Amino acid sequence: MALIERRQRAVDHTHEFAVVISPSWPQWRDWQRRWQYITAWFGVYRAPLALFAMSRVLLLVVTYAGVSLLAPGHVEHRLAGESLPDMLLRWDAWDARWFSGIAAAGYGGYQPGASSAFFPLMPLLTHIAGAPFAAHYGPTAYFAAGMVVANTTFLGALLVLYRLTLDLTESTIAAQRAMLYLSLFPTALFAFTAYSESLFLLLCVASYLCMRRGHWLPAGILAGCATATRFFGVALAVPFLIELIQQHGRDWRAWLRNGWSLLCIPLAVGAYALYLWRAIGDPLGFWHAEIHWHRQFLEPAQTLWIALTTVGQLPFGSTHQFNEIVDLLVVALDLGLLLYALTPHGREKLALPPSLLLFGIVLLLIPLSDPFVGYLPDFIASTTRFAFTIFPAFIVLAQLLRNRPTWHEIALIASTCLLVIYSLGFILGDYVI
């Protein structure tokens, strides 16, 4: 009897010790469920994660090869070599310097007036991420922070685009190809350096996904953040209103209950105007800055006509002519894809919502109505870069080429070649947009 009692006390002691050093069974089950959720999440989104990693590796290899083999310099400089961080600093060019400069010194301290054309969300995030390291690394910290913001938001954009395309097409192949075309688009290099493209893309895709799911408050907030990143975000009002009407019909009470979040778009512009009024004394500084960048309002048709007539006047084979031709081809391709998807045959075949397609068209027409009138050699400069954020065109293209392997391969090869060429030109100091 005594032996049985001693054994029972030993079992009780062991149980008490186990309770102290290990979680209880319900707690362990909670951790097990969390781990299963995490592994399932990675299983579902392994395609965008892998594509993001491969695209970053591609741009790193292009950077290393370009700087090592093609960058001008004396033999002594080549023999001394250049570290990978120094190579990455070659991405600190053109608009990346403006974003980093604004993040470091503010709109009043960095090129007052001209810097107002860059809307504040990207510089703000860059400042938040770079300020803790600025004392030690100086201005380089803000550029590095801008790269982190750009690449992180591009990963988020891929994840949300994958989810959105799955919802719209119910096709894993279409979702994967939409991400693939986006990642290898010729101007996808601007999602690698400290530009605002990837942040704007993420906010637009996320806002539209929320609209489709009827989450109106998050959709409005995200649309306001997109507008605070780039003025083009006002285009999100188009799909917002269309989806509101389609989902609620003539129920005006539902419109009032959910539509008020659309006010986040004008509120974002108003908040930026108030900030500029305090910082530089000009609440319309973002509008007046267009004069500095030689931009002027024109009708899109007039813009395209001038661009077409300019191509033949440029020196044959010149960089300006090449950029102008690529810009025109991208405009024609995007506009053709979106208009075709709106036709009865396209709607029957692709079954994509009109709100998505009209949003893409408006997003394309905005830069065409604001060309570089003072820079005729490249009249519609930046159009291909802006087209990178027109995600509806990538969804349409993925749907069209889903069962066309030959055209799919041609599109990938052509786009990848241009991406490599543009990336090499950017890191070697050429004006690539």
Image: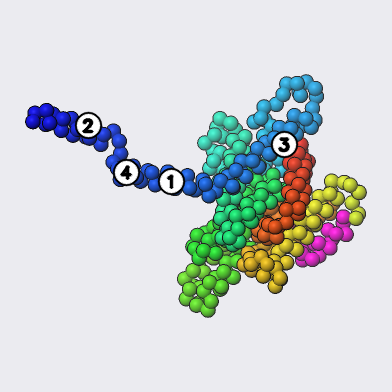
* Residue pictured at 50% horizontal, 65% vertical: 214
Residue 27: numbered disc: 4
Asked whether 163 falls inside the magenta stretch, the response is: no
Please name which of the two marks, 1 or 4, marks the residue nearer to the observer.
Answer: 1
Q: Is residue 415 visible?
A: no
Say which residue label 3 marks. Answer: 62
Mark toward the start of the polypeptide (2 vs 1): 2
Mark 2 lies on a secondary structure that is helix
Please name which of the two marks, 4 or 2, marks the residue nearer to the observer.
Answer: 2
Within 10 Å of disc 2 (Cα), the crowding (few <14, some 14-19, many 20+) is: few
Mark toward the start of the polypeptide (2 vs 3): 2
Q: CA distance from mark 4 to mark 3?
A: 48 Å
Asked whether 308 falls inside the magenta stretch, the response is: yes
> Is residue 45 found left or right of 178 in the rendered image?
left
Q: CA distance from mark 1 to mark 3?
A: 38 Å
* Residue pictured at 77% horizontal, 50% vertical: 410
Say which residue label 1 marks. Answer: 36
Tag 3: residue type? Answer: Val
Q: Are marks 2 and 1 in contact (CB under 8 Å)?
A: no
